[in-house]
Structures are given as structure tokens and as C-alpha cells.
Amino acid sequence: MWHTIANMQCVILAAGKGTRLRPLTDNLPKPLVKVSGKTLLDHIVASLPSAIDELIIVTGYLEDKIKEHCGKEFYGKKVTYVHQEEQKGTAHALWLCKDLLKGRFLFMFADDLHGAIDIARATSYTRSMLTFTTDKPEKFGIVVRYPDGTLAEMIEKPEHPPSNLASTGVMVLDENIFKYDPYAVETKGEYYLTDVLREYAKEYPIAVVEQSLWIPIGYPEDIEKAEKILATEQKNTLLRK
């Protein structure tokens, strides 16, 4: 399942209102909230491998501010914007990008921070998803692996978690995902990628890759925690040099 890395596109979902981060997101889209002096989008795009040559950013809430911040080229990568009128879930957002995507692509959210090494490892597989061991599995989408390390099952916020591996939202997928019906399962008016992945993985195995750094940003207090983690990471990097 190893893959020679050619140029790839990266889909970044950035349309949400970030309601849990209020009041920080009252007049600012969540991807532009700052951590350690840089916006979340800056952190995310700076950590992408050089093989990523185009960003497809799905925008909605206060999208003009995102367009103004990123422009037509961001960190040397071409930027294409896709408008998501209504928040109808992750599958709906990805399907809006369908006609722009070719071959393998990276998929991620604009509100969590990941280590550059982990993202690079994910792109070395034909298809993959990043996961992180959590002590609160009931709060996340939980991943169960087959013995060969590929995805067997994904369960959203399970009452009785079958594992403690949380999906962190970074995936390497390919255009075969669009063979499946994104609107087969509706949850409170939204269509989630989780349901499509279940079908896709049966035919196209997805390597489950454990990552070393994942900083989810959900609430205002998470920003201070994130800054402490990043400061420690930076210090450790300097010590290793």
C-alpha cells in the first residue's frame, strides 16, 4: 500500500461557524483564529508536504475574510475556493469539490493542528487516515482496525467504545470515493463522510496510521493548551538539532 508521492491536491473544510469558539468567532471565521501568533490555517498549510501543490478550501461563514487572508496562492500553493451555502456535513462538503479532484488527494479540517511528519507519513500510503490514542473515546469518531492495520469500522462518539483510537480527520483518499452515495444516510439534516468511508473501505483498503501530534481546537480554553504544546514541541525540536 506504499505510494510514490506525486503532486497532490488538499481539500480543507473551512466553512463552519465555529460556534463553540465564541466569542472569538463572532466576527472571525474559526480558521483565522490565532494560536501562538499564527492563524490555524497558517499552521495547517505550513505543515503540509511539498507534494501538495493545490489547496481546495471549502468556505462558508465569513468566507471573504478567508479569501482575503489566503489569496490565490498561499505558502506557494495554488488556492481554489468552493462555496458551501448550508452546513450539510462533511460528505456534502467533499462532494462539492468532486469535479475539481483528480487521483489521490489529502482531506482535512481547518480547525485542528497536526505534526508535519505525521501528515507526510499519511501521504506515503495509497489511502490512509490519521488516528490518535485518546482517553475520552466517547467524544470522537472511533476507529477499529483489521489485523493488517487497515480500517475495519468507524463509529461516531460510541457509548461503549470498541477501541481508543480516534480519527483526527486527516485522510488520503482518491476519486473512487465518489462512486458511493453521499446522501444514503442522513443525520439531523447532515451527511457525514463516516458513512461513505464505511462502504469505500470495503473495496479500497485504508491504512490506519497513528500520529504523534494532534491538537484539536474546539473551545476558547483549547488555545492556551495548544500554545503550551507547540512551545514544548519547538523546544524539543531545538534540543534534537
Image (cartoon, rainbow, N blue to C red):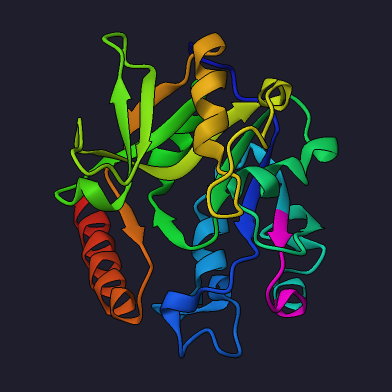
The number of numbered badges drawn on the structure is 0
Q: Is residue 235 magenta?
A: no
Q: Residue furthest left?
A: 135
Q: Is residue 62 magenta?
A: yes
Q: Residue 158's x, y, as percent?
A: 27, 42
Foreground pick, 41 / 203: 203
Q: Can residue 208 be seen at all in this image of the molecule? A: yes
For the point 51% across and 58% down, which residue is it? 44
218 to 162, vertically: above or below:
below
For the point 72% across and 80% down, which residue is it? 65
Q: Residue 189's x, y, as percent?
A: 61, 54
Q: Residue furthest right?
A: 99
For the point 45% across and 40% down, which residue is it? 119
The stretch of residues the image draws in magenta is: 57-65
Foreground pick, 19 / 24: 19
For the point 37% across and 24% down, which residue is it? 153
Q: Residue 35's x, y, as percent?
A: 41, 76
Q: Quadrant of residue 27?
A: bottom right
Q: Quadrant of residue 146?
A: top left
58 to 220, vertically: above or below:
above
- From the viewer's perspective, tell me whether residue 74 is left or right of residue 233: right
- From the viewer's perspective, tell me whether residue 152 is left or right of residue 79: left
197 to 37, vertically: above or below:
above
Q: Residue 54's x, y, as percent?
A: 74, 46
190 to 166, vertically: above or below:
below
Q: Can residue 241 be seen at all in this image of the molecule? A: no
